[in-house]
Amino acid sequence: MPILGRQALLYRATYPSNLSVSPAANSTSEALTPAERMDAGEKARVTYTYTSNANITTLQAVFRWLNSAGSEISRNTVDLTPNTTGTRTDEFTAPDGTANFQFGIKATSGATAGNAGANNITERLHFGLAKTCTVSVDADLIKEYVIGSDTPNFLTSGKKGFKVSFDMLYMDDKYAQKVLAGSKFDVIVAPDGWAAGKPLVTLRNIVLNSWEHSITQDGVIAESVEGEGENIEVTTQ
């Protein structure tokens, strides 16, 4: 039996705006999310709801990989059924040379213009070569005593903090830039991998407040990042 956590996965999550396309008759249109920093070997796991009308003849979800100049290296596509609505989760691994990732929807119309789109999009982007991850919940204790008693007459939980930290092998400056920009995103930890019924820990709206870069004598280049979120959800998949 595997030890819980041996297959642990760590993602940061973003929630781009809905996508929509309206290709003219006998033509194809594509819409893409804003580019997100990624590196080769990292995984993009996207959950989305797709829809289209009867005028759409072909429909695809697109995983688009870009290099540092913003040019497309390659793409993965998922064939979807036109004139239906469905929710999917798909995952692909970034190829060599990847610097950015985009998710998209691509549709082709028949003899009449059509409409298609993707909504409720969640992009979970793998953290890369993470070595450790620590998630903690801290709560202040509020205690009040009355005269003549050595036990609290009033005891309750006060202000809470939801913290995360992780160590990883250094690839680029994307997390340092997030500290500088004050960017918010979710951190999702799947302690025993992805599968129905397995645990899932989500820290919402993390702001990174610490980034540290280190180079050891044996040449290992690493980074340590810390942050704090607005709340935490401990659920099952």
Image (tube, helix red, strand yellow):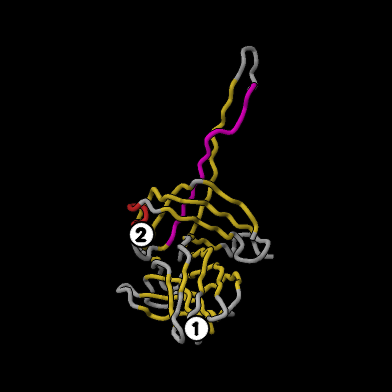
Question: Can you give x and y, in whole percent of width and height, for residue 88 in the image?
Answer: 59, 71
Amino acid under disc 1: Thr
Question: Under tag 1, what secondary structure?
Answer: loop
Q: Which residue is mark 1?
A: 112
Please report whichever mark, 2 or 1, sits nearer to the chain's N-terminal start. 1
Q: Residues within 10 Å of mark 2 (few under 14, many from 20)?
A: few
> Which residue is situated farthest in the top direction here?
148
Residue at image coords 51%, 61%: 10
Helix, strand or loop: magenta stretch = strand
Amino acid under disc 2: Thr
Does residue 160 belong to the magenta stretch?
yes
Side of 203 relative to 98 (left or right): right
In the depicted structure, whether residue 178 falls above or below residue 74: above
Q: Residues within 10 Å of mark 1 (few under 14, many from 20)?
A: few
Does residue 68 belong to the magenta stretch?
no
Residue at image coords 37%, 51%: 182
Is label 2 in contact with label 1 (beta carbons under 8 Å)?
no
Task: Write the start and end of the magenta stretch as one range.
Answer: 153-168
Question: Can you give x and y, in whole percent of width and height, for residue 151 in the image?
Answer: 65, 21
Number of the label disc, if any, that sits on residue 217: none
Q: Nearer the viewer, residue 204 or 17?
A: 17
Residue at image coords 67%, 64%: 196
Q: Which image quadrant: the N terminus?
A: bottom right
